[in-house]
Amino acid sequence: MTEQVLGRVAGLWRYPVKSMAGEPLETAEVDWHGLAGDRRWAFVQDDLVRSNFPWLTIRERAEMAHFRPLFEDPERPEASRTLVRTPSGEEIDVADPALGDRLGGGVRVIKQNRGTFDTMPLSLIGARSIATLGERVGMTLEARRFRPNVLVDADAFAEDEWVGSTLRIGSMRVRVDQRDQRCVMVNVDPDTTERDPRVLRTIAQERDTCLGVYGTIVEPGRIALGDPIVLDG
């Protein structure tokens, strides 16, 4: 039986610290909790610790996009020390209270071995979906604005049709469970940190506030740039 190839992997990112800059990858191990090392650290706002969303994010501090986490041993992120390169170029251990002070104080970092995900451990979005949205907004949009794990080369908005299906990417299998409902974070330019409300407004008006999809891992494995995305069930 001929495999149905839906697209190919055009980009990979993991985010060692929630809401900080992503780390571009050429290949990645994926376990039950997403890409190895993805969103294992997060900053909690002490005055919101009992809320449903206590995390400090780009919504509150857009400059977080300019803090770049890195692992001392990129091949073994789960066992590696995590550093954060500040906008000034200084490298600080993620657990150093000085880093929280740089973010404005009133926050502390926590580690979640299963990852700090808003919804599900893997997010996918189409490069052509982003380009088409950009045409409608009237500006060039980068994939980094939408913070995906996997950028796919497929027809525009094709990922919407994958909901309910299982995909095989490399040796990993993922079940696509739902569309990705967006928030004001997509208004923030990851380079300039300027906000443009047209982005979320257009997604709301034309895409029911959704762009991209979320999935859960069915079988751990390894994925890489260029891997075909195959319909597996």
Image (tube, grey):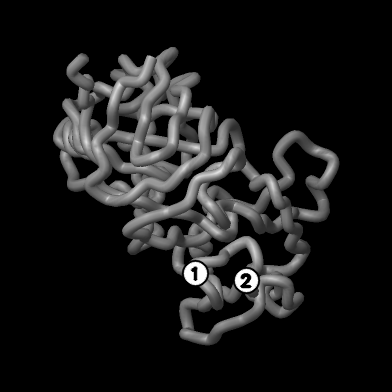
Residue 76, quarter of picture: bottom right
Please state, as top left, top right, bottom left or bottom right, where the C terminus lies in the image: top left
The answer for how far apart the CA atoms under marks 1 and 2 are is 8 Å
Residue at 35% in and 36% down = 169
Residue at 47% in and 20% down = 178
Q: Which circle marks residue 199 in the picture?
A: none
Q: Which circle marks residue 74 in the picture?
A: 1
In the visual, does 5 lie left or right of 189? Answer: left
Instruction: Look at the numbered discs 1 and 2 and tell me whether their residues touch, using CB distance below 8 Å.
Output: yes
Number of numbered discs overlaid on the protein picture: 2
How many other residues sit within 10 Å of disc 2, few (<14), some (14-19) or many (≥20)? some
Up/down of 42 relative to 223, above or below: below
Residue at 28% in and 32% down = 229
Residue at 31% in and 15% down = 161
Residue 182 drawn at (x, y percent): 45, 31
Please state, as top left, top right, bottom left or bottom right, where the N terminus lies in the image: top left
Identify the residue position indicated by label 2 in the image: 80
| Amino acid at the residue labelled 2 | Ser
In the visual, does 164 lie left or right of 50? Answer: left
Residue at the far right in the pictured view: 50
Residue at the far front in the pictured view: 1
Residue 78 drawn at (x, y percent): 63, 61
Up/down of 83 relative to 77, above or below: below
| Residue 38 is at least partly visible in this image | yes
Secondary structure under tag 2 reads loop
Nearer to me, 63 or 28: 28
How many other residues sit within 10 Å of disc 1, few (<14), some (14-19) or many (≥20)? some
| Amino acid at the residue labelled 1 | Pro
Residue 99, quarter of picture: bottom right
Residue 102 drawn at (x, y percent): 64, 75
Residue 232 drawn at (x, y percent): 36, 20
Secondary structure under tag 1 reads loop
